[in-house]
Image: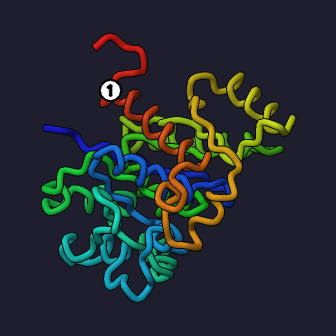
Amino acid sequence: MPTTRTIAIANQKGGVGKTTSAINLAAALAERGEKTLLVDLDPQGNASTGLGLEVSARKYTTYDFLFSDINPSEIVIKTQHENLSVIPATTDLSSADIELMSRARRSFLLHDALRHPEVKDEKYDYILVDCPPSLNLLTINAMVAAQSVLVPLQAEFFALEGLSQLMLTVRELRETANAGLRIEGILLTMFDRRNNLAQQVEADARANLGDLVLRTMIPRNVRLSEAPSFALPVLSYDSTSKGAIAYRDLATELLVKHKKLQPEGAVQ
């Protein structure tokens, strides 16, 4: 029986392409035929909007998924994209951190919710969790629920600063709450090969983090910036754009890593 792989997409720094990566990696995996669920755990709800869900259509949200007894089948929304569903978010999630403080097993609410029989029965290949831009209790919930953490990192000055705190959090959770948690990879985003600084950031990241830095890099691309305003992943908005190609490459790299695809040139 196929195992669901749950990946938290996290970086406490905002503006690094976290939600863009969540939307487009989910779309690229779904396009590959992987049954994918995107959990929007950011109160801004941008991942939900980017997949075409109007706020008025979000009857139930991740808040309900975490704190209520509503059946997941009523909360999960199938998107217009084949193989891709979403648990949407709205600003009602903003109060979640306060409510979590008073809960028993407060770090395990998402872990437990994702193991609800109705969720397990869907047999998702991938569950991606778009985390808020902070190391708060919602992000901790995502990391406790996940097998790995994908870290988008903008190719800019000071990019590596702050990464140490996220790495420390992962290490602490590995010791206390989720022994199997690991770093899925560091994903360089907004990369411009013509920019010497971007090249230096890449060199520094690969020198310091080695194979943790994924081969795929997401370029600066106007189509990636435009797609959310049309409530579409870039793969649907402009399928041949550099941004769409990069996220397809990222999906392929992860599928090969998870041994769901043969690497190019491999003997069949």
Q: Position of residue 193 (x, y in %)?
A: 77, 36
Residue flagged by tag 1: what amino acid is it?
Lys
Q: Residue furthest front?
A: 240
Q: Residue at x 36, y 77 (%)?
A: 61
Name the image quarter holding residue 199. top right
Count of marks overlaid on the render: 1
Whether residue 118 sits left or right of residue 130 in the image: it is: left
Q: Position of residue 159 (x, y in %)?
A: 75, 44
Q: Residue at x 21, y 56 (%)?
A: 115
- Seen from the viewer's position, the closer of residues 250 and 134 is 250
Q: Badge 1 local density, few (<14 within 10 Å), some, or many (20+)?
A: few
Q: Residue at x 41, y 54 (%)?
A: 27
- Seen from the viewer's position, the closer of residues 214 and 9 is 214
User: Is residue 13 in view?
Assistant: yes
Q: Residue furthest top?
A: 267
User: Is residue 22 in view?
Assistant: no
Q: Position of residue 156 (x, y in %)?
A: 79, 45
Question: In the figure, 77 relative to 175: above or below?
Answer: below
- Residue at label 1? 259
Q: Position of residue 183 (x, y in %)?
A: 49, 36
**Quarter containing the C terminus:** top left
Under circle 1, the secondary element is loop
**Quarter containing the N terminus:** top left
